[in-house]
């Protein structure tokens, strides 16, 4: 076993105030490698921005500005994280979820306008449909 030692004693990390947490299994179990760079960047942002229950609220324009992502990069990354069961999004709030048992490999990406209209949980139509119930158009 490797013996660890503190390298800079006067700069040992301390938890003060709020604290972002990423389970070590995220790296060891392959979740890290299951994400593309924009998904990883967005996931880490949500971890840092969320409260103790994983809830955060940032508008897409603020996220895009802070992370220097285009709206298309943001939407693809957000939808990738939803499809990989790492975050939930109701159109307003994000929740970082507990890790699933194993990484979910990418499903097909939403690449066309029809795909996004039908499958994107954050579109106005989907939000209204969720509020009114599935039987309404």
Image (tube, rainbow, N blue to C red):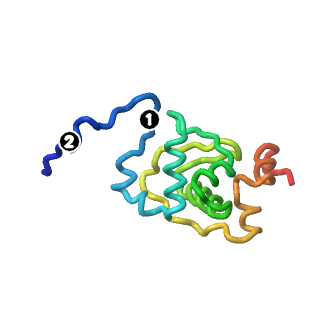
Please report the residue visible at 42 percent of the width from the left and 56 percent of the height from the top. Answer: 102
Q: Nearer the viewer, residue 74 or 109?
A: 74
Q: Which label number is shown at residue 19?
A: 1
**Which element carries disc 1, helix, strand or loop?**
loop
- Give the mark nearer the N terminus: 1 vs 2: 2
- Residue 32: which quarter of the image? bottom left
Q: Where is residue 121 in the image (x, y as percent from the top left)?
A: 70, 53
Q: Position of residue 96 (x, y in %)?
A: 53, 44
State whether residue 88 is above or below residue 32.
above
Q: Where is residue 85 in the image (x, y as percent from the top left)?
A: 54, 53
Q: Position of residue 122 (x, y in %)?
A: 71, 52
Q: What residue is disc 2 on? A: 6
Quadrant into which the C terminus falls: bottom right
Left or right: 11 in relation to 112: left
How far apart are the two marked residues, 1 and 2, measured between alpha carbons?
A: 21 Å
Q: Which of 110 and 15 is in front in this view?
A: 15
Q: Nearer the viewer, residue 77 or 13?
A: 13
């Amino acid at each position: 076993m490797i013996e660890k030692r503190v390298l800079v004693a006067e700069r040992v990390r301390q938890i003060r105030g709020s604290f972002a947490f990423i389970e070590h299994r995220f790296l060891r179990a392959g979740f890290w490698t299951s994400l593309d760079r924009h998904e990883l960047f967005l996931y880490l942002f949500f971890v840092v921005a969320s409260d103790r229950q994983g809830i955060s609220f940032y508008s897409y324009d603020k996220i895009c500005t802070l992370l220097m992502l285009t709206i298309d990069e943001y939407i693809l990354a957000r939808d990738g994280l939803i499809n990989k069961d790492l975050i939930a999004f109701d159109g307003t709030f994000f929740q970082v979820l507990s890790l699933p048992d194993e990484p979910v490999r990418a499903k097909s990406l939403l690449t066309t306008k029809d795909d996004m209209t039908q499958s994107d949980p954050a579109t106005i139509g989907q939000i209204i449909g969720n509020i009114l119930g599935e039987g309404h158009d």
